[in-house]
């Protein structure tokens, strides 16, 4: 098994002012940006296979469409170095004047022509979404359409080739903001203590995807639903230790004191309708009518939801012990996976087609648990914990800007506004060193109740 501790290289000292300050000179009109070293230059990605396909509707179709984007993982043992090199490339663009802004209300489409299409061609060439020899001209032709598709693919947008409002908004993000995203991602990776194995799992929270990686290639990629803005999913590293079929859900104390109590004050039948039980210190069942739901003091009982299709965790949970008490799991609200905006949980990660991910996790670990066996185990309705003799590393990362192994520079929206908290001192440390050794960390503090207590009514 391949196990590699993340290692980084020092950023060229001459680039320091450009990365930290963002000051530059005007780029002469029509002059192409100076090209960075080959390793730093974004490479053209393959045309997305799903661009002309019908919208995916089933979990299997959505997973296949997501995997078709690329087999390159969002996070591997060379991500840190590649982000540094991309910073050189983008800083060079900024020094030469950045890229032009398009009118916010611009309406052009394939087949159109005019000066604004010429401006669009220039914009796509500067960010390397269109070949330099295609810059001249005013026609929205096939080359421009493919360039727009390439740009959309890199920014997690619908790959249509049309200049719609989300694409125009992303095109007009200033170069300085993109540099800040790369800088913030670099800083967040600094000192991250993660050991890569031959097989590992990674969730990139801003992208709302989970990837199952084997031998530096993504073998599975699924849409996920992560934490709401006010209940964000945490960044963490852990190991997957078990897969639970038909799990029960013990409601966190904070959820009991707020959401459960509020429901019970309005509707005394709420617990029974939700297949929930009150349990005392010795797991004895307590009558809900004996409880003062005004919650003047902390309850001396726990609330547990029975296993079943109604369970907030769905039919399957992936155990990954961590200080935040979050995990990956199924959901009883699967229609949410069809949404482009997938920030709707209480901190946990709900996985589309989670049974397929569990089958990948359980490959020969232990033997006998393929997808058919998982389906059969769930069909029994009985709770079953499948322990893994060989644990699998898992990382939840928050990268709004990153570079894949083929050189594609990707960006996603900073939904939690973490990039605004960029620490320049921390960035200097990142630029100077990297993953030479994990940065000493203080003992993890308890996360806010809404996060640490995981999926309170997570799929409701």
Image (cartoon, rainbow, N blue to C red):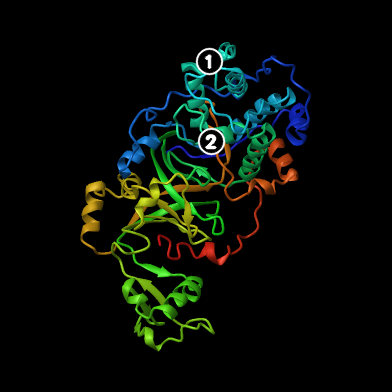
Any part of residue 435 in sight: no
Q: Which mark is residue 139?
A: 1
The reply, left or right, for residue 433 in relation to residue 457 is right
- Relative to 13, say whether 300 is above or below: below
Eyeballing the image, is 155 above or below 441?
A: above
Q: Quadrant of the N terminus?
A: top left
Quick one: which residue is furthest to the bottom in this view?
Answer: 290
**Label 2: which secondary element:** helix
Asked whether, in this view, residue 247 is left or right of residue 189, the answer is: left
Residue 357, horizontal then vertical, whole percent: 35, 46
Q: Earlier in the sequence, mark 1 or mark 2?
A: 1
Crowding at dot 2, Cα within 10 Å, few <14 / some 14-19 / many 20+, comes out as few
Total residue callouts: 2
Residue 217, given in percent of the width and then of the height, sits at: 42, 33
Q: Is residue 95 visible?
A: yes
Closest to the observer: 436 or 181? 181
Please state the horizontal and vertical placement of residue 148, each as a whole percent of the image.
51, 25
Residue placed under numbered mark 2 in the picture: 165
Judge by depth and name the residue closer to the eye, 67 or 162: 162
Q: CA distance from mark 1 to mark 2?
A: 20 Å
Please tell me whether residue 369 is drawn above or below residue 178 in the rendered image.
below
């Amino acid at each position: 098994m391949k196990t590699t501790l993340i290692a980084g290289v020092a950023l060229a000292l001459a680039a320091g002012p450009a990365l930290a300050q963002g000051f530059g000179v005007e780029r002469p009109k029509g002059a192409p940006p100076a090209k960075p070293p080959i390793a730093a230059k974004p490479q053209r990605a393959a045309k997305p296979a799903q661009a002309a396909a019908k919208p995916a509707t089933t979990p299997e179709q959505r997973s296949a469409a997501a995997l078709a984007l690329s087999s390159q993982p969002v996070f591997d043992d060379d991500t840190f170095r590649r982000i540094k090199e991309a910073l050189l490339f983008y800083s060079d663009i900024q020094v030469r004047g950045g890229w032009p802004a398009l009118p916010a209300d611009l309406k052009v489409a394939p087949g159109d022509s005019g000066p604004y299409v010429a401006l669009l061609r220039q914009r796509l060439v500067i960010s390397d979404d269109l070949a330099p020899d295609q810059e001249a001209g005013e026609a929205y032709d096939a080359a421009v359409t493919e360039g727009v598709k390439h740009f959309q693919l890199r920014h997690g947008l619908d790959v249509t080739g049309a200049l719609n409002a989300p694409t125009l908004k992303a095109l007009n993000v200033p170069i300085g903001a993109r540099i800040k995203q790369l800088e913030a991602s670099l800083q967040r990776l600094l000192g991250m203590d993660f050991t890569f194995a031959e097989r590992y799992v990674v969730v990139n929270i801003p992208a709302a995807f989970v990837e199952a990686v084997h031998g530096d290639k993504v073998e599975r990629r699924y849409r996920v639903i992560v934490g709401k803005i006010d209940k964000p999913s945490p960044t963490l590293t852990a190991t997957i230790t078990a897969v639970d079929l038909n799990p029960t859900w013990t409601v966190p104390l904070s959820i009991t004191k707020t959401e459960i109590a509020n429901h019970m004050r309005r509707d005394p039948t709420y617990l029974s309708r939700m297949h929930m039980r009150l349990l005392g210190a010795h797991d004895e069942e307590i009558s809900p009518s004996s409880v003062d739901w005004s919650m003047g003091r902390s309850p001396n009982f726990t609330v547990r939801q029975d296993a079943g299709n109604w369970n907030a965790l769905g039919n399957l949970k992936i155990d990954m012990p961590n200080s935040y008490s979050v995990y990956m799991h199924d959901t009883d609200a699967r229609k949410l996976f069809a949404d482009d905006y997938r920030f709707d949980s209480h901190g946990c990660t709900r996985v589309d087609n989670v049974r397929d991910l569990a089958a990948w996790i359980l490959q020969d670990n232990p033997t006998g648990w393929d997808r058919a066996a998982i389906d059969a185990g769930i069909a029994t309705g009985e709770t079953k914990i499948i322990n893994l003799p060989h644990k699998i590393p898992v990382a939840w990362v928050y990268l709004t800007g990153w570079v894949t192994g083929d050189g594609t520079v990707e960006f996603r929206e900073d939904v939690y506004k973490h990039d605004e908290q960029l620490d320049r001192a921390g960035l200097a440390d990142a630029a100077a060193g990297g993953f030479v050794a994990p940065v000493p960390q203080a003992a993890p503090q308890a996360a806010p109740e809404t996060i640490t207590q995981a999926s309170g009514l997570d799929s409701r």
